[in-house]
Image (tube, rainbow, N blue to C red):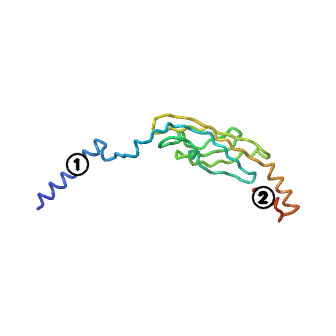
Amino acid sequence: MRRTMFKTICVITLVFFVMSMTGAAAACSSCSKCKVKTDAVNDKFTINCKSKSYCNNVLKNDKGCNLKVVKPGCYDTKLGGKICIQSNGKFCYTKPAKCTKACTDSFKYCIKGKDGRTDCATITFNINCDSCSKCTSVCAKNPTGSACKSCKC
């Protein structure tokens, strides 16, 4: 009985070993079906004045399979803001301190897909502080009015 059990375990182990060496164990029928070329698409986000940071994902509108950001990490933006971006596309952006009115900040990122192709795009942050100061003055005059309720600051 022990001998039969030992032989069975050896055969099963051998089968798994052979499958792992040939890649058969990791075969995925849906993995090879992706025919979409890697394409990074520019992103635009609008941030209100009072937001200290803004988080989202840059891969939402990009095209391709198994997309990853090429150089994840924390970087300074064009106007001195800060962006921390992960390989899965999630990012958090902190606006620059010098942006006290409306300003536009940007950051370039690159992605790589399953097809081995690398493509780059730009994230543009439209920071609108002017509308916030208008909202503040409108709400100070009539805090329950419809104009104040429509403010998103």
Q: SS of the residue at dot 1? A: helix
Residue 115 is tagged as none
Residue 150 is tagged as 2
**Upstream in the sequence, badge 1 or badge 2?**
1
Q: How many marks?
A: 2
Q: CA distance from mark 1 to mark 2?
A: 66 Å
Residue neighbourhood size for the residue with mark 2, other residues' Cα within 10 Å, grouped as few (<14), some (14–19), many (≥20): few
Residue neighbourhood size for the residue with mark 1, other residues' Cα within 10 Å, grouped as few (<14), some (14–19), many (≥20): few
Q: Residue at x 62, y 49 (%)?
A: 92
Q: Nearer the viewer, residue 32 or 4?
A: 32
1 and 2 marks in contact (CB < 8 Å): no
Q: Residue at x 57, y 35 (%)?
A: 120
Q: Amino acid at mark 2?
A: Ser
Q: Quadrant of the N terminus?
A: bottom left
Q: Residue at x 24, y 44 (%)?
A: 18
Horizontal side of 71 relative to 146 (left or right) equals: left
Q: Percent position (x, y) of residue 134?
A: 84, 53
Disc 1 vs disc 2: which is toward the camera?
A: 2
Q: SS of the residue at dot 2? A: loop
On screen, 85 above or below 140?
Answer: above
Q: Nearer the viewer, residue 91 or 36?
A: 36
Q: Percent position (x, y) of residue 48?
A: 74, 51
Q: Which residue is mark 1?
A: 15
Q: Amino acid at mark 1?
A: Val
Horizontal side of 143 relative to 32 (left or right) equals: right
Q: Percent position (x, y) of residue 69?
A: 53, 41
Q: Percent position (x, y) of residue 65?
A: 48, 42
Q: Quadrant of the C terminus?
A: bottom right
Q: Nearer the viewer, residue 128 or 148?
A: 148
Rendered image quadrant of residue 4: bottom left
Horizontal side of 111 relative to 21 (left or right) equals: right
